[in-house]
Image (cartoon, rainbow, N blue to C red):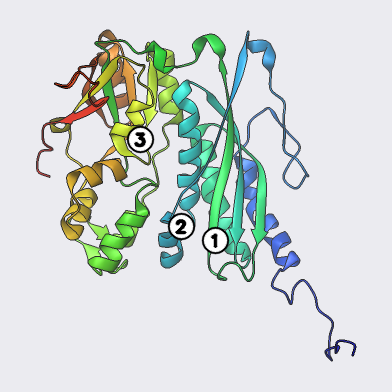
């Protein structure tokens, strides 16, 4: 027997859940935001098959390209629950470009990828508005991207975002772990909050264990829980590049997943260790709330969250005052976090921890 043929209109892409017309309307809606996030090197506009960027290599002796790809994790679940989508793009840009500047690279351009259950042009435009604003803050161009509609794989209201960024640095000016010396000082650049890491634990504690409503006012914050959790990740790109231009900064550590210890370890050469003084700062109330409501041990907090430190600059002791002045002028909270010293050994002769967090946080 031949297979039966259903009566009525034939199958279509739209009936399967993909609305090409909505995708085109989304592009039209996001175009004004994307066009603002540009640089003189950008060729053409939105809508081509490839983004074009004319790099002026004659200003470099030995140019090195740097690239980074990242997303924002489960913070998107908060944006979706709050139906607020115009700041999650700032988080995305921060996670990408602030990895680039760790080696001293100037972010040149970024391309985004949005996977969504159902294209709603207004929602896409809001997401891209945040991405474009983030690119402007970082000084890079939004060179294009892709929006993919995934009916049947994602809920209609669900989406995820990621991006790849490209930067450039002169080889002789690259910031490397091997530049770090004993006696160097750690200068902390304060975070704006949770940034974009640890949200699976934060959501589990605050929404599932404590059953706190996202729309509920929290006295310690002065606003709702949802508003606190959606505070955008601070973008440090221009601050770090300015610091690198005006001081002899050795390198930076972007404090993301893994917390202070694991990310500082990534920029320490063999034979050196970092000592971080907890007494030098007080973590924001959101960290205390998570720790208290979930009975989360300190070690777990410190390996999951940034605890109030979003970036660390490592620089010679003679440059500390200048660095703090530069960051203060740029309205970035900054303080001396600790120091670098020769690595010690445990009593059995084996190397000890590469990063030691000592002391206690005041009022935490």
Give the CA distance from mark 3 to mark 2: 20 Å
Residue 126 location, quadrant: bottom right
Find residue 238 and report its horizontal and vertical position in percent.
45, 27
First of labels 3, 2 by sequence position: 2
The reply, left or right, for residue 282 in relation to residue 97 is left
First of labels 3, 1 by sequence position: 1
Which residue, given by chain and number where applicable, does mark 2 sit on?
76
First of labels 2, 1 by sequence position: 2
Q: Quadrant of the C terminus?
A: top left
Which residue, given by chain and number where applicable, does mark 1 sit on?
159
Q: Secondary structure at mark 3?
A: loop
Q: Are marks 3 and 1 in contact (CB under 8 Å)?
A: no
Which residue, given by chain and number where applicable, does mark 3 sit on?
255
Residue 219 makes an appearance in the image: no
Q: Label 3 crowding class (10 Å Cα cut-off): few <14, some 14-19, many 20+? A: many
Find residue 325 and report its horizontal and vertical position in percent.
28, 19
**Residue at image x 30%, y 56%?**
202
Q: How many marks?
A: 3
Q: Label 2 crowding class (10 Å Cα cut-off): few <14, some 14-19, many 20+? A: many
Give the CA distance from mark 3 to mark 1: 25 Å
- Compare residues 297 and 187 and report the one nearer the observer: 297
Find residue 312 and report its horizontal and vertical position in percent.
32, 27
């Amino acid at each position: 027997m031949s297979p039966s043929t259903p009566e009525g209109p034939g199958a279509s892409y739209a009936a399967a859940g993909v609305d090409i017309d909505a995708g085109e309307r989304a592009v039209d809606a996001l175009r004004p935001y994307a066009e603002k996030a540009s640089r003189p090197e950008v060729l053409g506009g939105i809508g081509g098959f490839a983004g074009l960027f004319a790099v002026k290599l004659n200003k470099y002796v030995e140019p090195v390209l740097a690239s980074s790809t990242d997303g924002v994790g489960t913070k998107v679940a908060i944006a979706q629950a709050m139906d607020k989508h115009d700041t999650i793009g700032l988080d995305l840009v921060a996670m990408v470009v602030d990895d680039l500047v760790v080696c001293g690279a100037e972010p040149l351009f970024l391309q985004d990828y949005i996977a969504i259950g159902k294209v709603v042009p207004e929602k896409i435009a809001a997401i891209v508005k945040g991405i474009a604003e983030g690119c402007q803050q970082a000084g890079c161009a939004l060179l294009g991207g892709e929006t993919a509609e995934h009916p049947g794989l994602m809920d209609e209201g669900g989406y995820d975002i990621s991006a790849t960024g490209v930067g450039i640095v002169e080889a002789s000016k690259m910031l490397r772990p091997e530049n770090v010396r004993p006696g160097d000082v750690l200068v902390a650049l304060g975070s704006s909050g949770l940034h974009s890491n640890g949200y699976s634990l934060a959501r589990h504690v605050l929404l599932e264990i404590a059953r706190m409503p996202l729309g509920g006012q929290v006295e310690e914050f002065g606003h709702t829980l949802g508003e606190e959790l959606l505070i955008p990740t601070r973008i440090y790109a221009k601050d770090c590049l300015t610091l690198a231009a005006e001081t002899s900064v050795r390198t930076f550590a972007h404090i993301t997943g893994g917390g202070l210890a694991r990310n500082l370890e990534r920029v320490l050469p063999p034979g050196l260790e970092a000592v971080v003084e907890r007494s030098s700062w007080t973590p924001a109330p959101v960290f205390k709330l998570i720790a208290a409501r979930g009975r989360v041990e300190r070690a777990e907090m410190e390996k999951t969250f940034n605890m109030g430190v979003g970036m660390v600059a490592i620089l010679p002791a003679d440059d500390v005052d200048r660095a703090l002045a530069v960051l203060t002028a740029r309205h970035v909270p900054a303080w001396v976090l600790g120091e670098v010293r020769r690595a010690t050994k445990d009593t059995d002769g084996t190397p000890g921890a590469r990063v030691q967090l000592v002391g206690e946080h005041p009022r935490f």
